[in-house]
Image (cartoon, coloured by chain):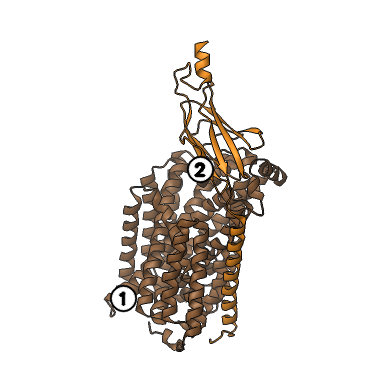
Chain colours: A brown, B orange
Amino acid sequence: MAEDKVFLDPTVGWILLALFSVLWIGLGVYWGRRNKSFEDHALAGRNVGLALGTATAAATWITSNTTMLAPQFALQLGIWGMLAYSTAAFGLILFAPMAKRIRQLMPHGYTSGDFFRLRYGRVAWAIFLVFTLFYSLTWLVSMAMAGGILLEALAGIDYAWGMSVILAVCVIYTMRGGLAAVIGTDFIQSLIIIVGICVTGFAVLQNVSVSEIHANLTATKPALLDVLFPAAIMAIFNNLLFGLGEVFHNNVWWSRAFAFREGVASRAFLMGGLVWLPIPVAAGFIALASGALGVAVPSADMVGPLVIAEVLGGVGAVAIFIVVFCSLASSIDSLLAATSDLVTEDIWRRLLHPSSSADNLKRTAQWVTLGLGVLTWLVCLPRIGTLATVLFFAGPLVGSMIWPIVTGLYWRSANTVGAIGAMVLGAGVGLYFYFAIGFYVATLIATAVSMVWTLGACALAKGRFDWTRLKEAA
Amino acid sequence: MVAAVFLAAGGLPASGLAAPAFVDDGPLATDTGHVHVGWTTDEPVTLTLTAPDGQVRPVYNGTNDGIFLSGLADGEYALNLVGESGAKAAPLTLSVSHQSLEQALWLAGLGAIVFLLTVIVILRGTRGEGADG
């Protein structure tokens, strides 16, 4: 039978928050000292090696969703739910060959927006910008809100203070250090997160055996072990395609494809995906053990911290605090950097000030980062709980962009009518089914509709795209 | 004697504490096998779940004001909440009826096709075998 649990002392929480804040800001300032131009700031001089590349791919994909939502998925949807979450790794794995292709086709490219503008024209580009900014801003808001809520739940730090500190720290070091600082801190954060999750997994197994967990689930939560669990079956490919859509379209990943050294991108994304793949399984396993450990779960999103605090006590509370802080920072900084680069390159430079100098663009990107941080802070401050769930609406939007991007990179017959129709129809039909059936089918249906439209448009196309049009000068 | 009858009926206990009560009047229903059950209470409570086969098991004991239940199979369940003083909440029923398995398998099949075609386009394109690459 389940009992109540407690977490970390607030003073310890504040000390940890202060220590890691100083560390990240210090490293950001240090790594940013060599940035002279927009290219240095936005793309780390296009010279990121394999180790840092792999770490940043894995760390950025390990969000607080991975450490918090993966256990929630396992608790709600069982073994299938756990595996469904881990299929998001295919986003990184399949982006590996695409990243190589992107570097070949667009040697001077900056953003995923550049691709849409040059490949499909301004209307498709505008739709893409609306979709991607909606996705990026809701992801950013959901991460910052999660930061405040989790720090309050874990250590009793007031929501407004916790959210403000995490956001401020990420804004400061991203402004100062650009992508180089983001990738450098990602390297350290990924190591901390992986060690933390592995230690927790082994600690759980020290407290309860797999056979005990299985016996408990069979007796009390039989559907979680059911191979024919309907909602979980539907979630598998929906989650997989959500992951593909997120990675394929977002500038977080395109900016890394442009930033990695020649020949590094495909290997870095492949290895990053393989490193990430088992993490949701390990995190989900923690949730499945909650019943056998006798942990009461008042709300599904708190199952991870509750189990960790149960098996590791005070040390566990410190560990989960650090892992959560690192997960949040590694995603918030990447989103801030990639979104500010997108706004600077696609809106400021391409639409408003085409003759901006490299130094001016760098300064603009820094101010945009600060502006994004302030905007996010203002949206998060009232703590409107339903805002975080808005991120789920993005599933159909990102799913509808998969086929325009994939065919746009490999097929000369891919065309503007196909891309626009695929995005608008796919997203619209997907959102309809979001409400008609549930979130666990919306991305799947959006991608399927988008695919059919794209294939039809390609089959009927008469013109053939000239790849050299993507080689726009910087 | 009167107090004992009152207690058994779930009214105000002798200690003066309000009897525990579920937040939802019910009945609860879910098509995913998971549900959040919330309650109000001034004292520690014990929550028990009666399965469709009549088996009763305790699922919570403590001072929280809710619990997340998941992994429940199809059927009608009964939830009973009892305070430390013996005061009882009005029982709550929970109906679990999972979504259509046929629909789930069709959608999974559709997902597999979309995913496989995506992989084929990427891999063929990478090898320079695209239809018009």
| Of residues A75 and B105, the one drawn nearer to the viewer in this rendering | B105
Mark 1: secondary structure: helix
- The structure residue drawn at horizontal position 44% and vertical position 76%, both measured from the top left corner, is A419
Report the residue marked by disc 2: A299
Q: Amino acid at mark 2?
A: Ser
Q: Quadrant of the C terminus of chain A?
A: bottom left
Residues at marks 1 and 2 on the same chain? yes
Q: Taking the image as drawn, is residue A218 in sight?
A: yes
| Residue drawn at point x = 60 percent, y = 72 percent | B116
Task: Sort mark 2 into few (<14), some (14-19) or many (20+) by Cα contacts within 10 Å.
Answer: some
Q: Secondary structure at mark 2?
A: loop
* Residue plotted at (61% across, 45% down): B71
Residue B129, relative to residue A98: is it above or below?
below
Q: Nearer the viewer, residue A82 or A395?
A: A395
Tell which circle, 1 or 2, labels the residue nearer the N-terminal end: 2
Up-down relation of residue A317 to residue A462 (above or below) = above
Residue visible at 41% across and 87% down in the picture:
A469
